[in-house]
């Protein structure tokens, strides 16, 4: 359901190879082939990228692999996004551009950017629901997911350093992993946090960038938007991605999704109708798909799944699941277990 730009996969592989590790066996185990990585516009299922990361961490001693990615990041690593950021008028505009187009890097990546009087906070997050079922399918633990979240942080910082050509005015960084190596690399106060975030000094945000060019930035925006329309999917796919994020936050309303897609409710409903869907249909499809994936993990209770999907209790979830599948969640889980045993 979620995918990652192939160039990010190449960065991960380059970092692994820089530690003297043969990446070919890792690719085979994760079900990836060289042909899948040949096209720089292509996207790879996130679960396979997580598996490569997981295998590298399990089989090799690379505790700070996320830092090894930085030397390989260039302005062109993430399609036209980096070039657009480099052509921004200032750091503030570059950060806004990253917030708008971060899904180029990974479809499940969400960025919130909040300028305030004294500081501006940028937060990187992936949908908790995406993480839940990717984690359940692979059987990976929080330690490996924290390591991959750190990878997202270091990759973004490396991209930002490359495109703005200046020292980053960081006041604080929050990371799931915080140690001396990371603090030294970031050159900023770093706290261990479940949230991944960066706090910038507001006084430095308006400083003009050396490569600022409004026309070039506009052209790069057009290229990114064309790419996203072609590769990320139609309006239904965009709505489904936002629904997945908002379900976990407990605010999956039409208004909230419209706001995140920078449109209004009426326009969003019209676009969905033109494609043969209603908003509720998309919500139900996402819930059903995620429910099935989570039910495949016996360590997650039916009640916990219900709450993760935004239901008030297990009874409401049971009724909805029966409507989708003609079975209760418990019966569906038992049937899947029986099929596995055959």
Image: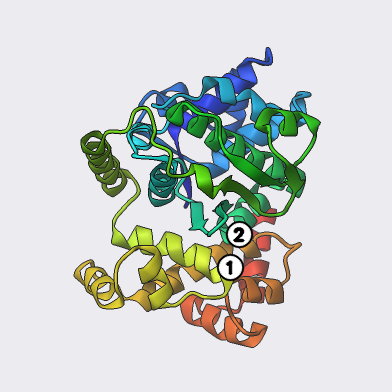
- Secondary structure beneath label 1: helix
Q: Nearer the viewer, residue 75 or 134?
A: 75
Q: Nearer the viewer, residue 202 or 175?
A: 202
- Quadrant of the rendered image containing residue 211: top left
Alpha carbon separation for disc pair 2 and 1: 6 Å
Q: Position of residue 207 (x, y in %)?
A: 43, 38
Q: What quarter of the picture does the C terminus occupy?
A: bottom right
Q: Give me the disc on residue 269.
A: none
Residue shown at the point (50%, 64%) measured from the top left: 244
Q: Position of residue 206 (x, y in %)?
A: 42, 44
Residue 288 appearing in the image:
no
Q: Position of residue 18 (x, y in %)?
A: 63, 15
Q: Give me the disc on residue 248.
A: 1
Residue shown at the point (23%, 42%) measured from the top left: 222
- Secondary structure beneath label 2: helix
The residue that mark 2 highlights is: 128
Residue shown at the point (55%, 30%) measured from the top left: 167
Residue shown at the point (29%, 67%) measured from the top left: 263
In the rendered image, the vertical position of residue 335 relative to residue 80, given as above or below: below
Marks 2 and 1 in Cβ contact (< 8 Å):
yes
- Quadrant of the rendered image containing residue 130: bottom right
Q: Earlier in the sequence, mark 2 or mark 1?
A: 2
Badge 2: residue crowd in 10 Å (few <14, some 14–19, many ≥20):
some
Mark count: 2
Badge 1: residue crowd in 10 Å (few <14, some 14–19, many ≥20):
some
Q: Position of residue 203 (x, y in %)?
A: 52, 46
Q: Is residue 16 left or right of residue 282?
A: right
Q: How is the image coloured?
A: rainbow
- Quadrant of the rendered image containing residue 65: top right
């Amino acid at each position: 359901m979620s995918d990652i730009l192939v160039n990010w996969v190449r960065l991960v592989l380059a970092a692994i190879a820089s530690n003297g590790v043969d990446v070919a066996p890792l690719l085979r185990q994760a079900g990836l082939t060289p042909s899948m990585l040949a096209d720089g516009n292509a996207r790879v299922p996130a679960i396979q990228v997580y598996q490569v990361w997981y295998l590298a961490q399990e089989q090799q001693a690379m505790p700070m692999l996320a830092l090894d990615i930085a030397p390989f990041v260039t302005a062109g690593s993430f399609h036209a996004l980096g070039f657009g950021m480099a052509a921004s008028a200032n750091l503030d505009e570059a950060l806004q551009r990253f917030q708008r187009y971060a899904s180029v890097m990974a479809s499940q990546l969400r960025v919130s950017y909040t300028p305030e009087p004294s500081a501006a906070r940028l937060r990187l997050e992936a949908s908790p629901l995406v993480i839940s079922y990717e984690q359940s399918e692979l059987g990976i633990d929080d330690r490996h997911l924290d390591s991959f979240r750190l990878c997202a942080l270091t990759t973004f910082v490396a991209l930002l350093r490359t495109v703005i050509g200046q020292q980053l005015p960081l006041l604080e960084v929050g990371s799931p992993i915080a140690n001396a190596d990371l603090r030294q690399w970031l050159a900023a106060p770093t706290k261990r946090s479940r949230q991944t975030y960066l706090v910038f000094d507001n006084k430095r945000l308006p400083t003009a960038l050396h490569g600022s060019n409004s026309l070039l930035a506009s052209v790069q925006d057009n290229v990114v938007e064309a790419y996203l329309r072609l590769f990320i999917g139609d309006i239904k796919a965009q709505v489904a991605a936002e629904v997945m994020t908002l379900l976990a936050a407990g605010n999956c309303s039409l208004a909230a999704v419209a706001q995140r897609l920078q449109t209004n409710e009426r326009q969003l409903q019209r676009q969905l109708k033109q494609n043969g869907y209603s908003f509720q249909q998309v919500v139900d499809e996402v819930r059903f798909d995620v429910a099935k994936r989570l039910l495949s993990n016996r360590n997650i209770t039916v009640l916990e799944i219900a709450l993760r999907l935004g239901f008030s209790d297990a009874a409401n979830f049971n009724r909805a699941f029966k409507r989708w599948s003609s079975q209760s969640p418990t019966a569906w889980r038992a049937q899947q277990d029986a099929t596995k045993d055959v």
